């Protein structure tokens, strides 16, 4: 696999120098200062490519922008409201500009409103490090008692509801504020974040949009953009839901094997593919990751490798970001499956996703889940495992 690294641009505390010293072969990034729905211009893309191509002293890095993560799909497109037809036109124009710049893989998602969701971005670990955590009880506290979403108390079973009620009664005001901020935050590096009132308004926009309607809207989007992807030689790689179940009453449509079957058949094209994220899909025990890799090998255009440890085998459940070779997923077995089934594993872009904050990461203001040392440790472990399995990543540079 081609070892890549997510980078949030010049403002990222992890620099191009750090990436190069970590041994990565390519960069995954986006134009995070731009609002969803606007056009990515050739000039803005070229500036980001220039940033990647140079170290801090101005010397060439030898690195290039390999994968876009992500070219965001606006909420207007997801709900088919407002100026969504213009947003789709802008999306296609951005695809044209990316292809002209030589970038061929675009990761995106179709998660309503919140994208990936956690309740704690710095849960303490026994070794003194920290990690991100999704606590189902805390999430119910947020939903029922802080956001006060209508009908939320009926969405959780009685055991979860009573535990949430008790926890809320014991929770300090500071923790309530922190929890609300964590759950409603935007993606790392994104141009926007949501206040509680913003979140309520965004949720209201999905009134009447169930799973079937959201699927229909995704199919409409794919029917619009995949012909352009085919013409330009682009690979569209849809990222699965995180966590892979409905949240805050919002439908989720890229969470299970059945969802992936629907997605790939909705517009049956090699350009309509997947970002295989072992952490997102692995948060559900009923997702057989090796079976998913085998079935969709031809459609997997990008790989996120991370490991979560589930509290139970039920869905939904609590989970935390474990070390890359630990957790509830058999990472070695998964790597074997990828190498055995993917048509071109040498050139398949992979990145170590998320990471625990360890060593000098602690106290640094890096994007949640994207520390330097924690990801470098994960990449080193994955690289070693791949070499032990006989995979020579250096061939990806040939």
Image: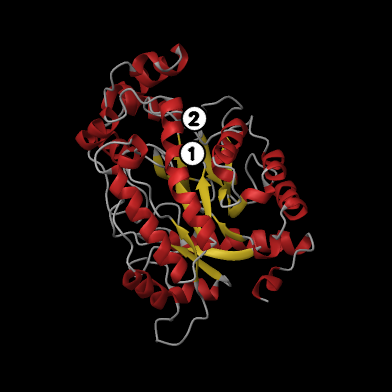
In the image, residue 70 sits, relative to residue 179, either above or below, namely: below
Marks 1 and 2: in contact by CB < 8 Å?
A: yes
Which residue, given by chain and number where applicable, does mark 1 sit on?
241
Indicate the position of residue 93 as horizontal and vertical percent values: 36, 59
Q: Which label was assigned to residue 245?
A: 2
Q: Which image quadrant is residue 30 in? A: bottom left
Which quarter of the rendered picture does the N terminus lie within?
bottom right
Colour setting: secondary structure
Seen from the viewer's position, the closer of residues 276 and 297 is 297
Q: Is residue 323 visible?
A: yes
Question: Which SS class for mark 2?
Answer: loop
In the image, residue 231 sits, relative to residue 294, either above or below, namely: below
Q: Residue at x 27, y 34 (%)?
A: 202
Q: Residue at x 36, y 49 (%)?
A: 187
Q: Is residue 129 visible?
A: no
Q: Residue at x 44, y 12 (%)?
A: 158
């Amino acid at each position: 696999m081609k070892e890549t690294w997510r980078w949030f641009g010049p403002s990222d505390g992890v620099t191009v120098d750090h990436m190069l010293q970590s041994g990565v072969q390519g960069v995954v990034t986006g134009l995070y200062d731009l609002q969803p729905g606007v056009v990515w211009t050739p000039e803005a893309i070229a500036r980001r490519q220039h940033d990647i191509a140079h170290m801090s002293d101005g010397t060439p890095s030898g690195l290039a922008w390999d994968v876009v993560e992500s070219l965001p799909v606006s909420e207007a497109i997801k709900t088919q409201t407002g100026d969504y037809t213009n947003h789709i036109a802008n999306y296609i124009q951005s695809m044209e500009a990316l292809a002209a710049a030589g970038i061929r893989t675009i990761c995106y998602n179709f998660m309503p409103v919140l994208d990936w969701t956690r309740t704690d971005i710095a849960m303490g670990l026994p070794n003194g490090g920290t990690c991100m955590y999704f606590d189902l009880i805390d999430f119910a506290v947020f939903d029922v008692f802080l956001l006060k979403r209508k009908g939320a108390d009926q969405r959780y079973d009685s055991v979860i509801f009573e535990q949430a009620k008790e926890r809320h009664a014991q929770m300090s005001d500071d923790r309530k504020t922190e929890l609300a901020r964590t759950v409603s935050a935007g993606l790392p590096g994104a141009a926007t974040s949501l206040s509680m009132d913003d979140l309520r308004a965004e949720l209201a926009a999905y009134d009447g949009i169930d799973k079937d309607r959201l699927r229909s809207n995704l199919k409409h989007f794919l029917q619009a953009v995949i012909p352009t992807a085919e013409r330009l030689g682009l690979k569209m790689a849809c990222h699965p839901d995180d966590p892979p179940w409905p949240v805050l009453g919002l439908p989720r449509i890229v969470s299970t094997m059945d969802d992936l079957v629907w997605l790939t058949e909705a517009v049956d094209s090699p350009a309509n593919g997947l970002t295989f994220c072992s952490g997102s899909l692995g948060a559900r025990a009923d997702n057989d990751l090796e079976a998913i890799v085998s079935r969709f090998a031809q459609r997997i255009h990008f790989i996120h490798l991370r490991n979560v440890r589930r509290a139970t085998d039920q869905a939904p459940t609590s989970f935390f970001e474990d070390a890359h070779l630990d957790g509830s997923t058999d990472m070695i077995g998964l790597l074997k499956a990828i190498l055995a089934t993917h048509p071109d594993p040498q050139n398949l872009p992979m990145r170590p996703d998320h990471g625990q904050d360890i060593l000098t990461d602690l106290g640094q203001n890096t994007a949640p889940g994207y520390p330097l040392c924690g990801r470098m440790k994960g990449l080193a472990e994955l690289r070693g495992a791949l070499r032990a399995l006989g995979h020579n990543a250096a061939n990806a540079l040939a």
